[in-house]
Amino acid sequence: MIALPALIDTTILCYALDTGEPEKRAVAVELLSQCWRSETVLAVSVQNLAEFSVVLTEKVKHPVPDAVVTRFIQNVVSFDGWRVIGYDPGTIIDAVGIRGKYSLNFWDALIVATMKQHNIDTIYTENSHFKKIPWMTVIDPFTG
């Protein structure tokens, strides 16, 4: 049986390039490096990649150049160790229901719905609100 990949949340991707929190950066880089070294397969949503782009170019204290962000995204989508997943109109409708049922913001509900669509039940994130979803396994790589 082949294990399904865990999804990497946007914050983990951002910490890997953001110099603002060196301790979290080291943890994020090591986690992503396991994928780059083909030790594990990781999943990422196109939504995560879009959010990653916005956060690192517009919202961090020291913005990352567009070329660096673009190269990172290109590397992710072209490497077999990353499973890039997307969503469709049905996923959006499912996200609306998840938002209401579990009191999540829409964008987090869309991540959950996208994971559900692709049969992914594990997420690496520091956002504990994903624990509201009973079928999800939430791993915070920065604790313990």
Image (tube, rainbow, N blue to C red):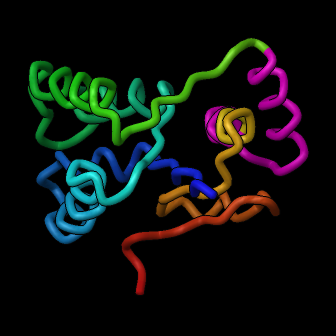
The reply to whether residue 105 is in sight is: no
**Which segment is the magenta one?**
90-112
Name the quadrant containing residue 114.
top right
Quarter occupied by the N terminus = bottom right
Left/right of residue 114 with respect to residue 22 in the rendered view: right
- As for residue 7 lying within the magenta part, the answer is no
Tally the numbered discs: 0
The reply to whether residue 10 is in sight is: yes
Tell me if residue 45 comes above or below residue 67 in the rendering: below
Left/right of residue 9 with respect to residue 68 in the rendered view: right
In the picture as drawn, the residue positioned furthest to the front comes out as 1
Where does the image place residue 131, in percent across and percent down from the top left? 70, 64
From the viewer's side, name the closer residue of 6 and 129: 6
Name the quadrant containing residue 27.
bottom left
From the viewer's side, name the closer residue of 39 and 6: 39
Where does the image place residue 90, in percent across and percent down from the top left? 81, 18
Where does the image place residue 34, in percent across and percent down from the top left? 27, 59
Where does the image place residue 12, in percent across and percent down from the top left? 36, 53
Q: Which residue is drawn at the image coordinates 24% and 22% (left, top)?
A: 74
